[in-house]
Image: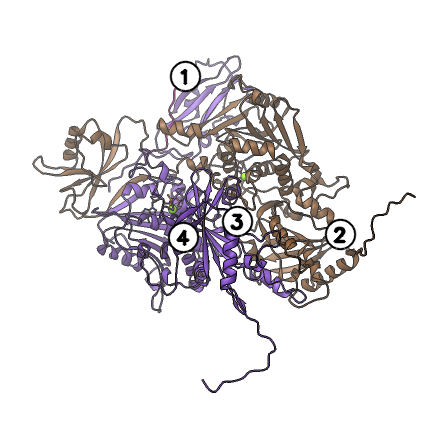
Chain colours: A purple, B brown
């Protein structure tokens, strides 16, 4: 490769030009304003001094000092240490005189590379004892959902945990059969905070401008990008090096980009431009640049043969504790992902156990592959998970109540409330492993003298889980609304019925979420707004009715129809029936 | 000012050099690898074509195409649109041939300026109905606390709300009498993610390297910087333009820097380097660059006369809803700030009403000034607030129990539990306006048939509020520890006593918080760790005793000593005594 140097972004200490430019302000007293001139530094202090005298017409007899803007006097000794390309200097009568007029000092404030490298480190936090790693993985799944949104056939998203050390260093890969990226789009992937809304501008232009997708049920629009940071935050939360390999349909070339902490550190050390890099363009399945030891990567690249379009995000330098968690708590995090993407995987009606899949949504396959040494690979499809919270809620519900909330101008929230009846001798309300069960214990334990049946079913849990563009926002819950809470005055039916409801809210993109997609910014506040209108939805039709009355009637009906309270008393001992 | 052009960071479309460089890979089939050469573009397509033939020794008879890496063929028509400085091009036999070997395409992925401009927009979210604006203000107060840490006299931090429109556009200013910044430090302020730990490196070096302060009681170390993003996030959450004015002690000059959304937009439009800018260096009190209309700013600059060192952060373009909130909910947010900085303002023992201030901490003044048209300015000192939650807890407590938790290597958590007794006819446990009171209502309302006195005092609130380096992290609470929760088996004393305790945890910087400083990353998980050791602290001495037993005994003592349950029954009517 011919040695060719791209003009670098100006770094404070960077620059490889032979002649340095410095900016000089003549601030000697007596002038009304400081004249500015640019000088090139030819050699040492002496020549520089002479050049200054010449440029500003200073007589040899005149006494003056040259100083930095921090009033450090330039001398023969410190000259080489101080002079840098683009530095601003003063010509002063005395080092501590005040400035006759203001001066403009040129600065460069390029974001530090930690902007990328540490972008995820302090974003994904634990709440209620949840390890946030699945939420970082979710960012990559979000991107794959967007990328596969217009697939004509099956949408396939694979999370591959390459933990067989005999095949190379551990890696976490997310691979989809989505539309892929051109090299411009791949470059744009790496631009921090370049959101889809900014792509129109020519410097970035990589596609037609952003078009907001039309409204769909449960806002399952696959449009889960917003900030231009998710992928970067996720990969640097998981590990410290990421390779993205991608190909668009019809393209001859695969594009590959490596972004790593190590590489940034090297560039800083060598005073190279921090945000310059290379994309490798190559034939599909050409792994000649990959070392023989890295069998995992070679295998992945070999798979390119059979793919028309795809994107693979391969994270290495994975933190040891993440590997442990992914290995040892597989069921936990896979179930959590099944929860987050429940409605993408199962469609707007969710996971109805025992019912064959028919909806168009059945074509999103999100699969987890785990490879470990001397073990058969483990494959899980999120669709097969049966104990994620939404599956539990849906399948223990006897009836449901649908509604809609209209907020401000275009904010639409679809809602469902489900009734989990009391059957025979117990509540059917599902347990949430993440909802601090201590709170429920509290109640169980203090009931020696007072049986609080009212609190048992839901306990202290909020009613509503909240989905944004169809995807769970895990740390925001909505406790209740005025119209579905236990009424102040004793009403039509036992208060415990109010604790037998669970709910889901589906918002569209008019509601904002935080950059880590863990919380809504102000969903709760907006729903409380007095202008928010709630309507009941029956058979897909909005009903102009009083929601509170409707809800109370529905709840009453649920209670009368589904709650079956049978109490056995007077226990007389166990009888074994021999006649059956 | 002489027109002088600093070499810009390379922008995708930027660059003002007359001769463009492009990188050409000869990818014609038959070669085993693609040779690369750099060419300068002299004039139009024809000359370029000729130059290519010459450079690569291509015979005039040979048919070839030149294309972009996205395989768009270069033609006379699109030449000017495609050719940009630093672009990579291919020489191909046919436009859709595959590459004989991989090519390296140069890219630049400079973070978008939204990195700064939108840094705070999706960070400060609402929780429990709290407007997050005070938490953004807190970032600026954090910075001022750090800056004033080594003041010898009074540490003064003023939040000035300049809302008198006759004096200029509305502004929010935070002004401190701290150490100020040199122009290098001011430049570093603007560098996104440049944390204090990176300052050692020469490009940034602006001070001695970071020195971790020695341990102090309650970790009140004033060292509340961590990520290099807080100030930027805060100012762009509050408004869209920020002026920082600062001076260090002994310096002749004031340094002033303006960072604004508008400015970024202008630079993008003019294809200028996004992260290049100017610092204005000038005499103190020189406001000649400020328009006459902007009386607010002129007045602030005039104040510089009397100050040896200071920093003023002045945010304009303040969002209308923020102004409304700041005006209309003054008591709310001032109290919230008093809560966040309770221990900085009152010292490690907190706000003991009626006791004169004596501790060394009494010298931090955090003041709020509100200026509105035709109103007298309103001044509030956070120290005077009497109804922030910590003041309420401290002053309604009858006794306290101190402990320490040692986590992993260097993690230290100091803890206090306070007992709020039942007095005569009611609980003295203070109400929290932010803790969704609906939950408490629930309980009050269902008590027709069952009086649950156990739940009344604290309700469902978690026991512990958590402070990091002495400053409240508002959205992380710790519910309880095993040893201070209601025991499974009925114990020594009534369960309601366990609901009469409030608590505070003070962590040092070995615990991590999220970049928005709203939550701890994993404090809860770490405290639950089985290796975490709890010890009781009495008279500043760690006691090697069983914490659970100690706590139970203390609680029992509190109950016996302080709870005074007097019930009046048999009401006979009101009697007016005429003899007193
Ligand atoms: N799997 C993928 N397939 C195709 N394009 C992708 C893929 N992943 C990312 N991209 C592209 O890279 C861009 C950047 O992704 P990133 O997740 O960092 O930000 P974002 O999705 O735009 O916004 P957010 O911060 O909300 O995630 C995306 O907008 C998309 O254009
Ligand atoms: N009021 C001030 N006085 C002096 N220096 C300040 C002041 N405010 C900010 N600085 C300097 O600017 C730097 C950047 O501030 P900023 O709040 O953006 O990040 P940080 O405080 O370093 O980290 P964090 O993200 O935790 O807030 C600080 O580290 C400090 O050196
Ligand atoms: Mg994304
Ligand atoms: Mg800060």
Q: Is B3 one of the magenta-colored residues?
A: yes
Q: Gap between marks 1 and 3, in whole Å?
A: 83 Å
Q: Earlier in the sequence, mark 1 or mark 4?
A: 1
Image quarter of the N terminus of chain A: top left
Which labelled disc corresponds to residue B214? none
Q: Gap between marks 4 and 3, in whole Å?
A: 36 Å
Which labelled disc corresponds to residue A55? 1
Q: Quadrant location of residue A384?
A: bottom left
Q: Is residue B111 left or right of residue A519?
A: left
Q: Are marks 1 and 4 on the same chain?
A: yes
* Residue A37, visible in the rendered structure: yes
Q: Gap between marks 4 and 2, in whole Å?
A: 48 Å
Magenta stretch in the rendered image: B2-12
Q: Do the CB atoms of the residues marked 1 and 4 lie less than 8 Å apart?
A: no
Q: Residue furthest left?
A: B61
> Could you tell me residue A500's position as x and y percent?
53, 59
Q: Chain of mark 2?
A: B
* Residue A96, visible in the rendered structure: no
Q: Is residue A569 left or right of residue B358?
A: left
């Amino acid at each position: 490769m011919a040695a060719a140097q791209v003009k670098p972004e100006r770094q404070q200490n960077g620059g490889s030009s032979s002649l340095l430019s410095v900016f000089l302000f003549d601030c000697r007293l007596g002038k009304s304003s400081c004249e500015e001139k640019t000088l090139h530094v030819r050699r040492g202090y002496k020549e520089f001094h002479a050049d200054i005298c010449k440029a500003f017409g200073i007589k040899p007899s005149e006494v003056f000092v040259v100083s930095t803007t921090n009033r450090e006097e330039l001398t023969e000794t410190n000259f080489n240490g101080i002079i840098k390309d683009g530095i601003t200097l003063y010509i002063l009568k005395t080092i501590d005189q005040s400035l006759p007029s203001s001066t403009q000092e040129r600065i460069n404030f390029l974001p530090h590379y930690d902007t990328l490298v540490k972008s995820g480190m302090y974003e994904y936090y634990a709440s209620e004892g949840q390890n946030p790693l699945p939420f970082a993985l979710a960012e990559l799944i979000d991107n794959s959902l967007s990328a596969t949104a217009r697939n004509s056939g099956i949408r396939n998203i694979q999370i591959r945990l390459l933990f067989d050390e005999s095949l190379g260093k551990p890696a976490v890969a997310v691979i989809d059969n989505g539309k892929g990226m051109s090299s411009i789009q791949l470059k744009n992937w790496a631009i921090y905070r370049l959101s889809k809304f900014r792509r129109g501008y020519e410097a970035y232009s990589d596609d037609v401008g952003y078009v907001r997708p039309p409204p769909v049920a449960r806002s399952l629009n696959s449009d889960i990008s917003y900030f231009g940071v998710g992928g970067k935050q996720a990969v640097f939360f998981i590990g410290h090096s990421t390779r993205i390999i991608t190909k668009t349909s019809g393209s001859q070339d695969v594009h590959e980009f490596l972004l790593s902490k190590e590489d940034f550190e090297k560039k800083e050390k060598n005073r190279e431009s921090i945000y310059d890099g290379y994309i490798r363009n190559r034939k599909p399945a050409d792994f000649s640049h990959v070392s023989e030891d890295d069998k995992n990567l070679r295998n992945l690249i070999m798979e390119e043969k059979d793919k028309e379009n795809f994107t693979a995000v391969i994270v290495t330098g994975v933190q040891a504790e993440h590997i442990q968690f992914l290995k040892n708590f597989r069921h936990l995090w896979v179930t959590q992902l099944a929860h987050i993407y429940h409605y993408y995987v199962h469609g707007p009606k969710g996971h109805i156990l025992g019912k064959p899949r028919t909806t168009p949504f059945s074509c999103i396959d999100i699969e987890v592959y785990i490879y470990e040494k001397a073990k058969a690979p483990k494959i899980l499809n999120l669709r097969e998970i049966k104990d994620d919270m939404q599956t539990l809620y849906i399948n223990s519900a006897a009836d449901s109540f649908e509604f809609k909330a209209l907020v401000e101008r275009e904010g639409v929230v679809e809602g469902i409330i489900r009734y989990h009846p009391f059957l025979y001798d117990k509540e059917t309300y599902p347990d949430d492993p993440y909802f601090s069960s201590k709170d429920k214990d509290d109640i169980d334990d203090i009931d020696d003298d007072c049986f609080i049946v009212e609190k048992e079913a839901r306990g202290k849990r909020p009613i509503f889980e909240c989905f944004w563009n169809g995807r769970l926002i895990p740390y925001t819950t909505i406790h209740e609304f005025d119209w579905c809470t236990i009424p102040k005055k004793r009403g039509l039916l036992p208060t415990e019925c109010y604790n037998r409801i669970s709910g889901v809210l589906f918002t569209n993109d008019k509601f904002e979420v935080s950059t880590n997609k863990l919380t809504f910014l102000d969903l709760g506040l907006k729903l409380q707004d007095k202008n928010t209108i709630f309507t009941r939805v029956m058979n897909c039709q909005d009903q102009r009715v009083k929601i509170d009355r409707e809800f109370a009637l529905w709840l009453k009906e649920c209670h009368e129809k589904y709650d079956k309270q049978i109490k056995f008393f007077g226990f007389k001992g166990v009888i074994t029936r021999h006649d059956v």
